[in-house]
């Protein structure tokens, strides 16, 4: 069911997944503000504990996802990648509370993938220059230009469709199972004996592993945008 917003004589239809994404952004913005204040007040001479320890664990987790590819540049890109990881991982888990994951909406995934694609292209042009990028696209000779261009364009397509397909499939299968359970009640109540395993795979394992794959691939291609001599 879509949300309908009327402004003047115009009517806008907003998909629930977009609303969920915006709400998640608000919740995480509040979380980041609280976390920042807590960390500022923490005593650096003492081991972290409680909320600060949780924040440190999350930062280390995000660092571990991208540091293998970005290496010495991890600190430079961690605010960008870390913020998106904190957004994507919870959004993939919203199915656990009965909300549609924003990443099951193709428009959200395409936006995220295009952000990564544009960042990678910008870094490539900045590091290698227009001539360097042209040589890279025409390697080993100019007839390979269309294939190399398709290879670059395949990245946002791959990132968005992989994430979209996995999250949407999980949402559809879970919905079908619950619909079937309602149709065969009271025997359908037996379905609750295996639905936890269904959610464990589609909402937790698949959601988290897709987040890991998305940002591992994005950070890998970003590292490839730098000059070959830099590691």
Image (cartoon, rainbow, N blue to C red):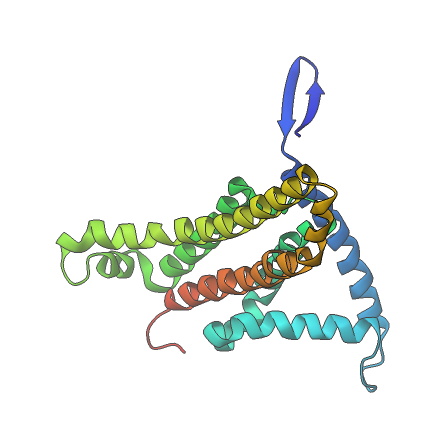
Q: How many marks?
A: 0
- Can you say whether 2 is above or below 59 in the image? above
Q: Position of residue 94 (x, y in %)?
A: 68, 51
Residue 8's x, y, as percent?
A: 70, 15
Q: Position of residue 148 (x, y in %)?
A: 25, 55
Let me know if residue 15 appears in the view.
yes
Q: Who is closer to the viewer here, 144 or 198?
A: 198
The percent coordinates of residue 80 (x first, y second) are 58, 60
Q: Nearer the viewer, residue 5 or 38?
A: 5
- The image quarter in which residue 135 lies: bottom left
Q: Hey, which residue is sitting farthest top in the picture?
A: 9
User: Would residue 98 be visible to someone looking at this image?
Assistant: no
- Quarter where residue 198 is shown: bottom right
Quarter of the image with the N terminus is: top right
Up-down: is 229 above or below 183? below
Residue at 57% x, 44% y is 172
x 50%, y 77%: residue: 72
């Amino acid at each position: 069911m879509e949300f309908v917003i009327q402004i003047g004589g115009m009517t806008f239809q907003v998909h629930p997944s977009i609303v969920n994404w915006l709400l998640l952004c608000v919740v995480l913005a509040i979380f980041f503000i609280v976390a920042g204040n807590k960390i500022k007040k923490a005593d650096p001479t003492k081991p972290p504990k409680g909320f600060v320890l949780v924040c440190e664990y999350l930062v280390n987790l995000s660092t571990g996802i991208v540091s293998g590819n970005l290496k010495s540049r991890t600190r430079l890109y961690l605010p960008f990648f870390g913020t998106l990881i904190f957004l994507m991982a919870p959004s993939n888990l919203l199915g656990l509370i009965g909300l549609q994951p924003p990443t099951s909406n193709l428009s959200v995934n395409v936006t995220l993938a295009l952000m990564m694609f544009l960042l990678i292209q910008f870094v490539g042009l900045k590091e290698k220059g227009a001539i360097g990028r042209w040589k890279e696209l025409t390697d080993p000779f100019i007839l390979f230009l269309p294939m190399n261009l398709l290879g670059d364009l395949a990245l946002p397509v791959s990132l968005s469709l992989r994430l979209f397909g996995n999250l949407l499939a999980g949402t559809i299968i879970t919905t079908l199972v619950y619909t079937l359970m309602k149709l065969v009640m009271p025997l359908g109540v037996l379905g609750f004996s295996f639905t936890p395993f269904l959610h464990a795979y589609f909402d937790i394992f698949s959601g988290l592993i897709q987040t890991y794959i998305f940002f591992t691939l994005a950070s890998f291609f970003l590292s490839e945008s730098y000059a070959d001599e830099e590691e």
